[in-house]
Amino acid sequence: MRFVGYLAMGVAAALAAGQAGAGTLDDVKKRGSLLCGVTTGLAGFAAPNDKGEWAGFDVDVCRAVAAAVFGDATKVKYVPTTAVSRFPALQSGEVDLLSRNTTWTYDRDVKLGFDFVGVSFYDGQGFMVKKGLNVKSALQLNGATVCVQTGTSTELNLADYFRANKMSYKPVIYEKADEIRVAYDQGRCDVYTTDRSGLAAQRTQMSKPDDHVVLPEVISKEPLGPLVRHGDNQWGDVVRWAFNAMIIAEEKGITAANVDQVKASSQDPEVRRLLGVEGDFGTRLSLENDWPYKVIKQVGNIGESYERHIGPKTPIGLDRGVNNLWSSGGLVYSPPYR
């Protein structure tokens, strides 16, 4: 009888896992829109533009997933989340995925029950100060007041760094990034700490951006990326490969502008598979076979997104660096589409 009981439990668990595996994609299709958790506003990554439309590097991941599922990158409802509210929003199903500046860590992957589907931006935590303080190194910050966002790995890294270097500090804690920027700009703290990409973005919003400098120290690894709930492998695969399609497109030199020409003429087997010319790869995700074509046509490749929102020619002004393709000396890499 005990064996029968265990067998019944195993069957129930398998059924539950099967239901979870198909759940989110079915729900998204039935709803007719993707619920994408983003920041409350971070220039270049996710913020409303002059028309009130959400735009940015992280937003493009949401758009890519919508293009893959619906063939229409506009079918997204953006849900602003804070560092505190983001994880409950994903766990409860308020959003289908998070695409915001969230660091992939052991506890978030294992303890909180999330799956990071890739690294969209390789970053590290830094410090910004006013030039007038004449500080050249973070090792000169003993006794400083430091503005930091609560509920983040940034807060923990800050404590570790000062402890390791036998320095003291006074944290000034806020929930929202915009609150920190205002507080720091108004002189309520000496130092602003967050990911260096975030510092670059927030500096553009300061009253006098040129009055601030990011110190040279990088005190942590911050692999940022989109994440979904554990237990829904099909949905995780959809989000993962929508993102990977943008990477492969740049590897293959496919852009939003030339994708139609490439689709019509390319003899590269992987390109033909990617663009739905041959093979049956889309149906394996319960999507159309040419879903990557729709992602590239409407959103572009990962390099286009980077240059459009946060690259050297934007106010954010970030060089690609380690965020370049592996073939160009960076860390960005996708598994093969085969």
Image: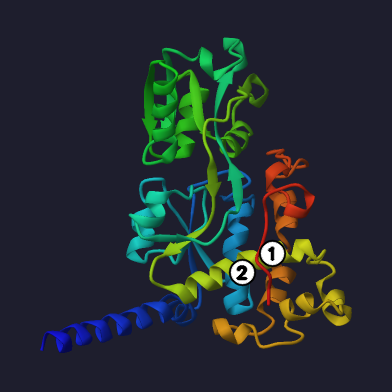
Residue at coordinates 62% horizontally, 51% vertically from top-left?
Answer: 49
Expressed as whole percent of the image width and height from the top left, the position of residue 295 reads 68, 71
Q: Is residue 230 above or below residue 287?
A: above
Give the class, few, some or many, for how many residues have Cα within 10 Å of label 2's Cα (few <14, many ≥20). many
Q: Which residue is mark 2?
A: 242
Residue at coordinates 39% horizontally, 66% vertically from top-left?
Answer: 230
* Res. 254 in view: yes
Dot 2 falls on a residue whose secondary structure is helix
Q: Quadrant of residue 203?
A: top right
Q: Nearer the viewer, residue 180 or 322?
A: 322
Across the whole image, how many numbered discs are drawn on residues?
Answer: 2
Residue at coordinates 16% horizontally, 86% vertically from top-left?
Answer: 3
Q: Which mark is residue 246?
A: 1
Kindly identify the amino acid type of the residue bearing the numbered disc 2.
Ala
Quadrant showing the C terminus: bottom right
How far, Cα to Cα, is label 1 from label 2? 7 Å
Give the class, few, some or many, for how many residues have Cα within 10 Å of label 1's Cα (few <14, many ≥20). many
Q: Is residue 297 above or below residue 207?
A: below
In the rendered structure, the answer to whether residue 300 lies left or right of residue 215 reads right
Expressed as whole percent of the image width and height from the top left, the position of residue 328 reads 79, 50
Expressed as whole percent of the image width and height from the top left, the position of residue 302 reads 70, 58
In the rendered structure, the answer to whether residue 104 lies left or right of residue 214 reads left
Quadrant showing the N terminus: bottom left
Mark 1 touching mark 2, by CB under 8 A? yes
Q: Nearer the viewer, residue 250 or 38?
A: 250
Type of colouring? rainbow
Q: Quadrant of residue 291?
A: bottom right
Kindly identify the amino acid type of the residue bearing the numbered disc 1.
Met
Dot 1 falls on a residue whose secondary structure is helix
In the rendered structure, the answer to whether residue 305 lies left or right of residue 96 reads right
Expressed as whole percent of the image width and height from the top left, the position of residue 43 reads 60, 43
